[in-house]
Image (cartoon, rainbow, N blue to C red):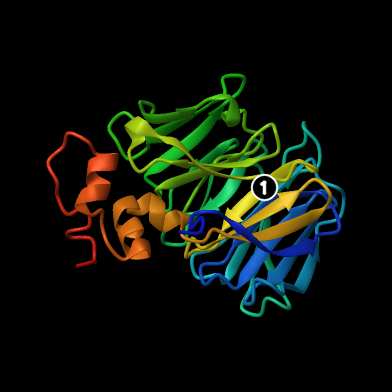
Amino acid sequence: MKQPGRPQRLASMDLGAFVQSLAVSADGTTLASADRRGRITLWDITTPARPRTLSVIARGAAGYEMHVSLSPRGTTLAANGAETLFSKGWTATWDLTDPRRPRQVRTTEGYPSSRVDFGPNGELRTIPMGSGLSVDKRLMARTSVGTNEVTITDISASDPSRPVGRVSGDEWNVTVAPLFHPGSNLLAATSGSGDVVLADIGDLRRSHVAARISDPTEELTPLAFSPDGRLAVIARGDNTARIWDLASLPALSADPIGTACRLAGRGLDREEWATYAPGLPYQDSCRGHGTS
């Protein structure tokens, strides 16, 4: 088996400035990037190995913070930010019926300490900085400054502040908000070392590091997943972004036994069972997982 869960780099993009936020449309064809020069760039990533620019929205002055989000249908772009740490902040939306010609719909003041997000039905809302929501908007992951820990809470529960899971360790000295994979079995964040760390959170009581995407020459910053969970887009400190194919990592996380059985085409025979599971009664390790 040839490293089925190892991410592979597909393409590199020159973003022209330090990127603060990324978002991918629900159909996986459009990428939005917000940079520190106050620009939002829309990219066509229909062919991930050959991304191309669709349009650039200029907000003007360089921003202290700026975040972007795309609606579930991909027809609305929302952004919010602040020019300085102490400014009021702003939120704006654009109609993306034609992503080559975005049309601004509205701008309002406020939300300097939150980031913009869309709910499952397309409603616009904000969530705290340093946090990320699962696709079903039920779980929230938040960084804990100085603790090397990310706390996961169920915000639909009667006590939304009570942790239901944690991921911790030196690699979780994270520098950006954690991000849930669309399959909800993986949680990703950029660590202080510059690596993107992906944790398997299928069992919230036993989370563990499933993979790393490393680039030792540059600090990695924001990241985004394609809706099908196959691609990861990762911004870098040198004003570029790279598109990675996560290969079978999401499938391995969601169903490790089934994925291994499908890749190998069979389960362990009796001799292998005696080697890897000594002392346990033999059983067909792939029964019920799609192989005979």
Q: Relative to 46, does residue 88 appear above or below in the rendering? A: above
Is 3 on the left-hand or right-hand side of 257?
right
Q: Quadrant of residue 277?
A: top left
Is 165 on the left-hand or right-hand side of 131?
left
For the N terminus, which image quadrant? bottom left
For label 1, count other residues whose C-alpha is less than 10 Å away and answer few (under 14), some (14-19) or many (20+).
Answer: many
Q: Residue at left 40%, top 58%?
A: 251
Q: Can residue 182 be seen?
A: no
Q: What is the secondary structure assignment of the residue under circle 1?
A: strand
Q: Relative to 185, does residue 14 appear above or below in the rendering? A: below
For the C terminus, which image quadrant? bottom left
Q: Quadrant of residue 196?
A: top right
How far across and down, in percent of the image, does residue 67 sit? 67, 49
How far across and down, in percent of the image, does residue 95 sit? 63, 71
Q: Quadrant of residue 57?
A: bottom right
Q: Amino acid at mark 1?
A: Pro
Residue under circle 1? 222
Q: Can residue 26 be seen?
A: yes
Q: Residue at left 79%, top 68%?
A: 56
- Residue lying at the far left in this picture: please name it: 281
**99 or 93: nearer the viewer:** 99
- Residue lying at the far front in this picture: please name it: 271
